[in-house]
Amino acid sequence: MKKIVILISGRGSNMQAIVETALAQQWPVQIAAVISNRADAAGLAYAAGKGIPTAVVVSKQFADRESFDAALQSKIDEFAPDLVVLAGFMRILTAGFVKHYAGRMLNIHPSLLPSFVGLGTHQQALDAGVKLHGVTVHFVTAELDHGPIVAQVAVPVLEDDTEDTLSQRVLVQEHLIYPQAVLQFVEGRLSIKDGRVHVSK
Ligand code: GAR
């Protein structure tokens, strides 16, 4: 049984989609913990309500990224995960932390990478005037919002879209694509070669 630790910073709707899909489809996994860097992350209550262990490592209490990431890493490793899932975990990660979870840490980013890294991706897409926007699930590497791409879904950008309407359209796809990618990892179907992800049948 594969163990998954999910990291969140806020709402946790992607975490919720993964947990609900795992339960509904009876995945052979244990959601070992949901960990947040913010005590007020709304998703913590959902996880606790499902009987999933939760933990908080408050990023603000650490002097620098290295000490926070070290504390976070030791908390995560208490649960000995096979996979770490970043689900709206809004932190820039140190290279050492990323290396420790190389090949076993996924992230979801609300754009068609490599376009629109960082924050405010929906507004970035509107400002750029692109006609297609979307979402990417990728393995995490040291460079922010980069790394081998597991899956992408595009959505149209409509004439009268606002940041709000566009983000809603992308979020619907996030909740479908992320559980699917996590399951592919759990089933051992993802491999990385020359920076590209191969998904076996
Ligand atoms: C999601 O849209 C996710 O793609 C994004 O934050 C949101 C979290 O929502 N992540 C990033 O921007 C990472 N760079 P959620 O807490 O409801 O899952």
Image (cartoon, grey):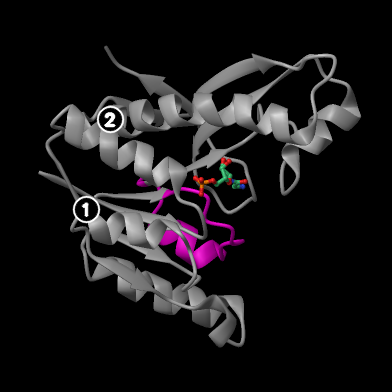
**Helix, strand or loop at mark 1:** loop
Q: Residues within 10 Å of mark 1 (few under 14, many from 20)?
A: few
Q: Is residue 72 left or right of residue 158?
A: left
Q: Which residues are magenta?
A: 86-104
Horizontal relation, residue 57 to residue 173: left or right? left
Instruction: State the image quarter where residue 154 is shown.
Output: top right
Write down the residue under mark 1.
50
Q: Residue at x 81, y 37 (%)?
A: 123
What amino acid type should be assigned to the residue bearing mark 1? Lys
* Mark number displayed over residue 183: 2
The location of residue 140, given as percent across then percent down, is: 50, 46
Instruction: Inspect the magenta stretch and tell me whether residue 93 lies in it.
Output: yes
**Residue 57 coordinates in the image, percent (x, y):** 43, 76
- Residue 116 showing in the rendered view: no
Q: Report ligand 1 position as a quadrant.
A: top right
In front: mark 2 or mark 1?
Answer: 1
Answer above or below: position of 98 versus 29. Answer: below
Q: Position of residue 175 (x, y in %)?
A: 44, 31
User: Alpha-carbon distance for marks 2 and 1?
Assistant: 19 Å
Depth check, front residue: 194 or 49: 49
Q: Nearer the viewer, residue 64 or 52?
A: 52
